[in-house]
Amino acid sequence: MADQVTVFAPASMGNVAVGYDVLGGAIDGLGDRVTVRRLDTPTVRVGSITGRAPDLPTTPADNTASVALRSLRDAVGLDGGFEVSIEKGIPLGSGLGGSAASAVGAVVAGAALLPTSWSPADLLPHALAGEAVASGDLHPDNVAPCLFGGLVLTREMTPPDVVPIPVPSDVRCVLVRPNRVLHTRDARACLPDTVPLSKSVRQTAHLGAFVAGCYRDDLALIGRALRDLIVEPHRAALIPGFADVQDAALSHDALGCSLSGAGPTLFAWCTGPDHAERVRDAMIGAFTQHDVSAEAWISPIPSEGARITNLPPSDSQSP
């Protein structure tokens, strides 16, 4: 059994417009690298934090990765402990599942250092415990796709019931992040406590039609359904130029465009890489008109979630 494991945990887009807090998709290429090392002492501690968010908390009670590992350790009743180090590839407060990726990467790596095997469903509650440190509650829309991969709908968390949704092979996701930070807690604070029944009914219809479109490989149906009537109207004002960026994507025939998770990143679903490049350029141009710089990625929805990238021999490291 190894003494140290490194895991790549992908970024993710939560909600996917139609499924607030229940639907999410993994992103290819962008993510965190999380390394966990076994310790002989019964503690969980944070080692180094590097990359795009080096100022993350190192106090174990405040770090999503260490809290997730502590939950895993307590569940196992482990005599020893863990040290976790994080190389952040996901920008902080971007709406790309950065806190979820650190938590997921930590539990996947920690589980690989244990003698028993763990399924993604087994690890989900522990990763959610870590994510709650950042978001304030148990939200699976980023944790589940990061852990399971693909596009997934979390029907229930106790016990975990995560449903994979097929994505048409032509779909490419454009993600455009303005040079802004928006914390999940702040984005949730602007939402109303109640929703009119008529809007709830319409949003439920959109979600059902979207899932049907994915199963039927019906891009036109997906395009008609990829709408957020409940959350987006309240959060749009938090992102400078939101309406113009969304209009730029839709005017270039994107299937849909909305916030990735809590924002400020916007995503758009497109039909193929060439189409995605045109939509990306239009969205960046719209942000520029508001004097906002932005960076962008184009990604399929990868089927693979968090995975081990480095598993050295057990005698190559000392605990």
Image (cartoon, helix red, strand yellow):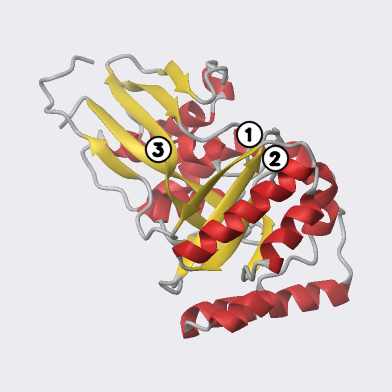
Q: Which mark is residue 105?
A: 3
Q: Tell how many labels.
A: 3
Q: Mark 2 Cα within 10 Å, few/some/many (few <14, many 20+)?
A: many
Q: Is residue 90 visible?
A: yes
Reading the image, the residue beneath label 2 is 184
Q: CA distance from mark 1 to mark 3?
A: 15 Å
Q: Earlier in the sequence, mark 1 or mark 3?
A: 3
| Disc ID at residue 134 | 1
Q: Position of residue 226 (x, y in %)?
A: 66, 71
Contact check, label 1 and label 2, Cβ < 8 Å: yes
Rendered image quadrant of residue 45 = top left
x 70%, y 40%: residue: 184
Amino acid of disc 2: Thr
Q: Amino acid at mark 3?
A: Gly
Q: Would you call the spot at circle 3 few (<14 residues within 10 Å), some (14-19), or many (20 or more)?
A: many
Residue 22 sits above or below residue 312 on the image: below
